[in-house]
Image (spheres, rainbow, N blue to C red):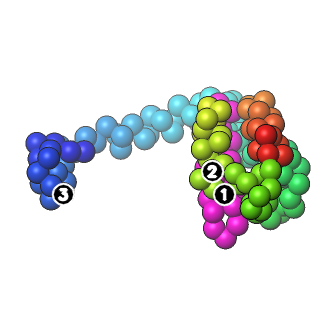
Amino acid sequence: MISHGYMTGFHGEFDWTGTCDPTPWLCIPDSLRFIGGLLPGGWPQVMQANRALALDARRLLLETAQVDSPCPDGMIGSMASIPLPAAVPGSPAHRLDCKGLHDWFRERSVETWIYHHPVPLLRISAQLYNSLGQFKLLAALLEEALSGG
């Protein structure tokens, strides 16, 4: 955060950050209790539900991208990475460089995390507030992107 040193250069803007608000740290115990209370089985059920959704979404997106699973299901928690086919210059899916694909999704109001190394990866995260329908929308958009749409 820039405070009183605005427009005085890097050191003037960032050498003093003002006050430190401990609110985020103080909220952690209540946040953990809240999320653990969302399902009758507590945190174990929350983690199980998130993992089940991540696995379903991963299968859907791997099938859509027509790529093999990079690891066994046993290595997946609530997040998964889907390898994307490499971009071929001049192909209909030329947007498959990471920035181009990220921008293409953003233009369609979908926020994604795409990483470029060692191969292009689409990372998904499943939480209680997500649904398989959201991942089906992502799969449909990914299919459109891969076909050059």
Give the residue displayed 63% in from the left and 50% down from the top: 100
Of callouts 3 and 2, which one flags the residue occurring earlier in the amino acid sequence? 3
Give the residue displayed 14% in from the left and 47% down from the top: 7
Magenta-colored stretch includes residue 122? yes
Q: For the N terminus, give its image quadrant.
A: top left
Residue 20 occupies quadrant = top left
The residue under label 1 is 97
Instruction: Residue 136 in the image: state x and y as whole percent.
Output: 80, 35
Depth check: 22 or 43 in front?
A: 22
Depth check: 34 or 140 in front?
A: 140
Q: Nearer the viewer, mark 3 or mark 2?
A: 2
- Residue type (three-letter) at the residue carrying disc 1: Asp
Within 10 Å of the Cα at label 3, are there few (<14), some (14-19), or many (20+) other Cα atoms?
few
Within 10 Å of the Cα at label 1, are there few (<14), some (14-19), or many (20+) other Cα atoms?
some
- The answer to whether mark 2 and mark 1 are in CB contact below 8 A is yes
Q: Nearer the viewer, mark 3 or mark 1?
A: 1
Depth check: 57 or 84 in front?
A: 84
Give the residue displayed 57% in from the left and 34% down from the top: 35
- Residue type (three-letter) at the residue carrying disc 3: Phe
- The answer to whether mark 3 and mark 1 are in CB contact below 8 A is no
Furthest residue in direction bottom, as rendered: 118
The CA span between labels 3 and 1 is 33 Å
| Helix, strand or loop status at disc 1 | loop
- Residue 46 appears in the rendering: yes
Of callouts 3 and 1, which one flags the residue occurring earlier in the amino acid sequence? 3
- Residue 139 appears in the rendering: no
Q: Which residues are magenta?
A: 113-130
The residue under label 2 is 100
Instruction: Residue 10 in the image: state x and y as whole percent.
Output: 18, 57
Residue 53 occupies quadrant = top right
